[in-house]
Image (cartoon, grey):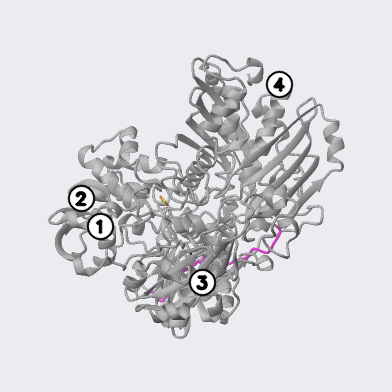
Amino acid sequence: MSAPTLSGAGTGEGAPLATTDAVELALVVDGERVLVRAHPLERLSDVLRARLGREGTKVGCDAGDCGACTVLVDGAPLCACLTPVGRLDGRRVDTVEGLGEEPTGRALQRAFLRHGAAQCGFCTPGMLMAARALLADTPTPTTAEVEDALGGVLCRCTGYRSIVDAVCETHLELEDAPAPEVGKAVGARVARLDGAAKVSGSDAFGDDGVDPAALLVRIVRSPHHRARVDLGDLAAFVASTPGVERVLTAADVPGRNVHGVIPPFADQPVFAEGETRFLGEAVAAVVGEADVVARLDLARLPIAFEELEAVLDPVAALAEGAPRVHAGRAGNVLVRGLVERGGDVDAALAGAAVTAEGTFTTGFVEHAYLEPEAGWARMEDGVVVVQATTQAPWMDREDLAAILGLPLEGVRIVPTAVGGGFGSKLDLSLQPYVALATLVTGRPTRIRYDRIESMRTTTKRHPSSITVRAGADAEGRLVAVDVAADFDTGAYASWGPTVANRVPVHASGPYHVPTYRARSRAIHTHQAPSGAFRGFGVPQATIAQECVYDELALALGMDALEFRLRNALTAGSPTVTGQVFETGVGYRDCLEALRPWWERARARAGEATDGARRRGVGLAGLWYGCGNTALPNPSTIKVGLDPEGRVRLHQGAVDIGQGSNTVMAQILADALGVPLERIVLVDADTRHTPDAGKTSASRQTFVSGNATHRAGRALAHELARLAGTTPDDVIDLGLERGRLSVRSTAGLVAVDLAALPVDADGLVVACSATYDPPTVPLDEHGQGEPYAVYGFGAQLVELEVDVETGSIALERIVAAYDVGRAINPTLVEGQIEGGIAQGIGLALMEEWLPGRTDNLHDYLIPTIGDVPEIVSILVESGDAHGPFGAKGVGEHTLIPTAPAILNAVRDATGVRLRRVPAIPSRVLEALRAAGVGPSSHPDGSERRR
Ligand code: FES
């Protein structure tokens, strides 16, 4: 046994340094003089949040890498997490919570709301304060000045362009748009209804509003990818450590020591027993008084780890005699996927006029949301209440109840605001530990992962190795496509089965492919679990498919846009699963929308190929099915009237920044025929809102939006009935001062709402509705109707490659998306810009290496200077199934960015890159291997003309 090396910090706030050395300091915070006793080295961020109760300042890394905690000290922007409070005696500190007290601050907040510059809102306080410092000196900044001033603050949601626009326009003090007229909420650029809390710092995230008396939980984690564990005498440790209440292990789990997002595959233990399977896996949790546990040296615990042989990639995992990650999963293969159609794919490829093929690889990608996992638990009338950051409250409740050995009603989930999720917060992380700690101690308990813990232990995008072979006839029509895709699913199943099933359905791209075969495998390794990340494997598959299709076009001497148009799916043509859509197939329209941009960019790309810089342009398209793959996927929404005549929208579709709170309200307003401002949101809470499913798979606008529309129509019927008429005869509804007024063809009827009985939710009239998309299960050949709706899109990238350094400079990205109907164009554009920024990260810089890039200093995500001009074009095909014709768009936006970039690099240099991220050293290596340098020029025959 080696000596234990333990990870896991999670110190959290409320864990101050020793008070014996504390000094009294006088600060002027947001204009108010405050006295505070604190250790001089205590972080300003902790003092603001834990001692002064100003939680508007958010903490994303405690290392000065993310800038979320930016405040102004005597007017200068500083990271509060790196600023010792002892330096600040007598000085002025301004935070987001004082921003609304002065005119420029208010104008800045309004501009952020108008531009949709706050999505999840976690970076927003830091962005606002950095911008406020700039505007103090430069009231009318240029784009470059804004980018320079905000360069130290990261945002993972917006893609930054809306933030830059908001800051540039603050001085104009533009009026807010008037509220939409009744019946015109859908399609209006409404500012997000929950936005005011985000720009004022009052939005409560997982770590906000915690009971200050809560016990602190810290998790003891494996220092090895695979290890045998000896827990030692933990009882003796607890007995000899004042302030430590318990050390929890698998033996303390009263129910099932396992969880998983897909029940038949659930395999992840709350605490590993006997053997750990990935670096950072939990084996125990220390629970105790915050000041003791925060400063506890976890190496004092008697836990020892013996390192064992591990398999760290799929090649090693598939090798003969490789250690088994799970005893019951032969060959370390978790699951396989298959879609095949049209006969013998090898024969069809052999008969093609031209063929192209390639193998493309991707690594682990970290979600890098700005808010690390955080939350707390408490007992309330015998129920364990967990208040935490999550995308899936009902799934959390089900798993926690099983873990705690309680009935479902014994657990209540209250999702907090979510500081970005992108798929990873679908899986349980901290929740079992605080829930169990509270159950066994009876006291409130809390936890906040530190940045390393968050990045090391939560799910990642699946690394992949994908081979595509494709063939076309002499006219450029695809005749056959063959795909073989391997994914590293890590130590536990998580969403591996979903990736393995979704990828074969999508790996053809949005094209008519008569002969098709796509096989996939999810392979276990001793790595952190791979899970859901904006696209469930489709971004990786699209890289391979769209790059190989570009090679086919080159081989044919065809223009890349024309090649895609010739093969594009249209209404009436079957997909590779045999599904035929009669409406809502807007891919050709997206490509045509790009045509003028493409032709201009093609002309420019031909001009500048001198010296070390090579200009290129690339295209890629995508399709993406909204919702679960051929599985039930219902959402239920409840709406009603309270006695004051407000319309209450009980919607459990967790808004993780994408805007579901606002979109559902817009849909409800028009379904019911009332002004948008009459609607009051009731946030997700498993006690008060029905099950709207998880926020994933781009399903909320489509699925929960349909449920909202149905509930709104049901309420309209009910109100008409109360007034003795029918919805068809209603001319308008009035809901003023506790009175329902229904004007119909028969006259005006008033109903005194206050005279009606109220239900448990305080509603006098209430309706619920459920929507479950119509799908048909896939057969053994992958044939069926996996999704009721697909979204389509295409992106065009213009860039320059420096062939001397291997660096790639993006100039512009134009994105055209078929969104069915844009319920809120500003929110849709925000999704497009944010998805593109993550696509840039996937393509050019992001690679998570366990134990090496577990922080935001070494793991690079796009900064404000990395995202170029983005032009968004919205195509509205009016889908037959969508609410008001709308489709989802959240994941679609990331998918084509990386292949479009790789195709543009190919265009610029003649070199096909096959591994992402295309960091400069890899690009340079590929260029050198192809003999491309400053003195060479790309072969004209290899470029599209
Ligand atoms: Fe910037 Fe979410 S809005 S991190």
Q: Are marks 1 and 4 in contact (CB under 8 Å)?
A: no
Q: Nearer the viewer, mark 3 or mark 2?
A: 3
Mark sitting earlier along the chain (1/4): 1
Q: Nearer the viewer, mark 2 or mark 4?
A: 2
Mark sitting earlier along the chain (3/2): 2
Mark sitting earlier along the chain (2/4): 2
Q: Nearer the viewer, mark 3 or mark 4?
A: 3
Identify the residue position indicated by label 3 in the image: 432
Identify the residue position indicated by label 1 in the image: 44
Which mark, residue 670?
none
Identify the residue position indicated by label 4 in the image: 557
Q: Which amino acid type is shown beneath numbered disc 1?
A: Leu
**Within 10 angstroms of label 2, few (less than 14), some, or many (20 or more) residues?**
many
User: Which is more toward the observer, 373 or 529?
Assistant: 529
Mark sitting earlier along the chain (2/1): 1
User: Which is more toward the observer, 521 or 770?
Assistant: 521
Q: Is residue 801 visible?
A: yes
Q: Are marks 2 and 1 in contact (CB under 8 Å)?
A: yes
Distance in Å between CA atoms under marks 3 and 1:
31 Å
Q: Nearer the viewer, mark 2 or mark 1?
A: 1
**Within 10 angstroms of label 1, few (less than 14), some, or many (20 or more) residues?**
many
Distance in Å between CA atoms under marks 3 and 4:
58 Å
Which mark, residue 73?
2
